[in-house]
Image: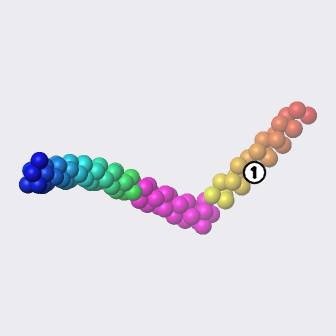
Amino acid sequence: MTEVLQTNIFFFIASAAVIAFTILLCVAIFYVIVILRSISQITKRINEGSEHIASDVSRFKSYVLEGGFISQIVGLFARSGRSKKRRQQSDD
């Protein structure tokens, strides 16, 4: 084989390898983009959920500070105490 033929074969193989590597790199970049979009959607849902949780906590906090929560708890204990007294009186 002549040197020119060997050089041409080398450049042909090198060109094929570069083309194959470029195609594989494009496929890998495509999948990375798909994964990043999925992560973006997940973080968006998490942010929306955390906003809902924060609003629920703030509503609960205002409800507790107004005294509604404590009055309901006291009311539950007061009712249970009254029902026990009524049962004892009806049993006697």
**Majority SS type along the magenta span:** helix
Residue found 57% across the figure and 64% down from its top: 61
Residue found 46% across the figure and 59% down from its top: 50
| Mark 1 burial class by Cα count in 10 Å: few <14, some 14-19, many 20+ | few
Residue found 23% across the figure and 51% down from its top: 21
Q: Nearer the viewer, residue 51 or 79?
A: 51
- Amino acid type indicated by mark 1: Ala
Tell me the quadrant of the picture where the C terminus can be found. Answer: top right
Position of 55 relative to 12 (above/below): below
Residue 35 visible: yes
Residue 89, horizontal then vertical, whole percent: 87, 38
- Mark 1 lies on residue: 78
Question: Secondary structure under badge 1?
Answer: helix
The answer to which quarter of the image holds residue 51 is bottom left
In magenta stretch: residue 64: yes
Residue 8 visible: no
Residue 6, horizontal then vertical, whole percent: 13, 51
Residue occupying the far top of the picture: 91
Residue occupying the far bottom of the picture: 65
Q: Nearer the viewer, residue 6 or 44?
A: 6
Q: Nearer the viewer, residue 70 or 26?
A: 26
Q: Nearer the viewer, residue 78 or 65?
A: 65
- Horizontal side of residue 22 vs 66, given as left or right: left
- Horizontal side of residue 16 vs 70, given as left or right: left
Q: How is the image coloured?
A: rainbow
Residue occupying the far right of the picture: 92
Q: Which residues are magenta?
A: 46-68
